[in-house]
Amino acid sequence: MTYEIIFDKEAIKFLEKLLKNVRERIFNKIMGAKERPGLFFEKLSRRDDYKMRIGSYRAIADIDHTLKRISVTKIGHRRNVYKRI
């Protein structure tokens, strides 16, 4: 039961700005969550989305367990990734 992973445009833009080795590490960690996202993602308090820790970076995602879909909505440095627009 593999989950489908979808990247938001904002998340892709952020990844493209990073150095290749950092970008690959983040991408590979997110893709590794396909089989069992509960091992990689942690529910955020007082919010409906989840976070994944990747060194000093965070991936924020919405996880739909019924549709088996992980929507990566934002990727950023831990000090400013939680700020909402």
Image (cartoon, rainbow, N blue to C red):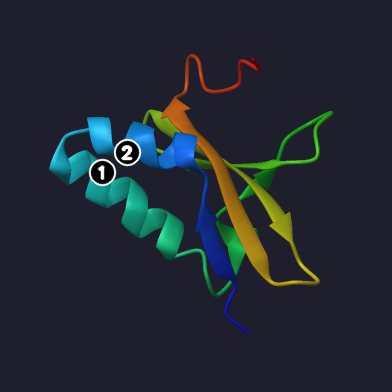
Residue found at the far bottom of this picture = 1
- Which badge, 2 or 1, is on the more N-terminal residue? 2
Residue 55 seen anywhere in this rendered image of the structure = no
Say what amino acid the circle numbered 1 marks: Arg
- In this rendering, is residue 11 above or below 5? above
Image point 34% across, 47% down: which residue? 26
Residue found at the far right of this picture = 46
Q: Residues within 10 Å of mark 1 (few under 14, many from 20)?
A: some
- In this rendering, is residue 9 above or below 66? above
- In this rendering, is residue 26 above or below 28? above
**Which residue was labeled with disc 2?**
15
Q: Position of residue 1 (x, y in %)?
A: 63, 84
Q: Position of residue 78 (x, y in %)?
A: 47, 23
Image point 73% across, 35% down: which residue? 44
Question: What is the secondary structure assignment of the residue under circle 2?
Answer: helix
Residue 3 seen anywhere in this rendered image of the structure = yes
Residue found at the far front of this picture = 9
- Quadrant of the rendered structure where residue 17 is? top left
Q: Are marks 2 and 1 in contact (CB under 8 Å)?
A: yes
Label of residue 53 in the image? none
Question: What is the secondary structure assignment of the residue under circle 1?
Answer: helix
Q: Quadrant of the C terminus?
A: top right
- In this rendering, is residue 75 above or below 65? above
Label of residue 23 in the image? 1
Q: Nearer the viewer, mark 2 or mark 1?
A: 2
Q: Residues within 10 Å of mark 2 (few under 14, many from 20)?
A: some
Lateral position of residue 46 relative to residue 55, left or right:
right
In this orientation, which residue lies closer to the viewer: 58 or 64?
64
Q: Position of residue 16 (x, y in %)?
A: 26, 38
Image point 55% across, 75% down: which residue? 35
Say what amino acid the circle numbered 2 marks: Leu
Image point 27% across, 49% down: which residue? 25
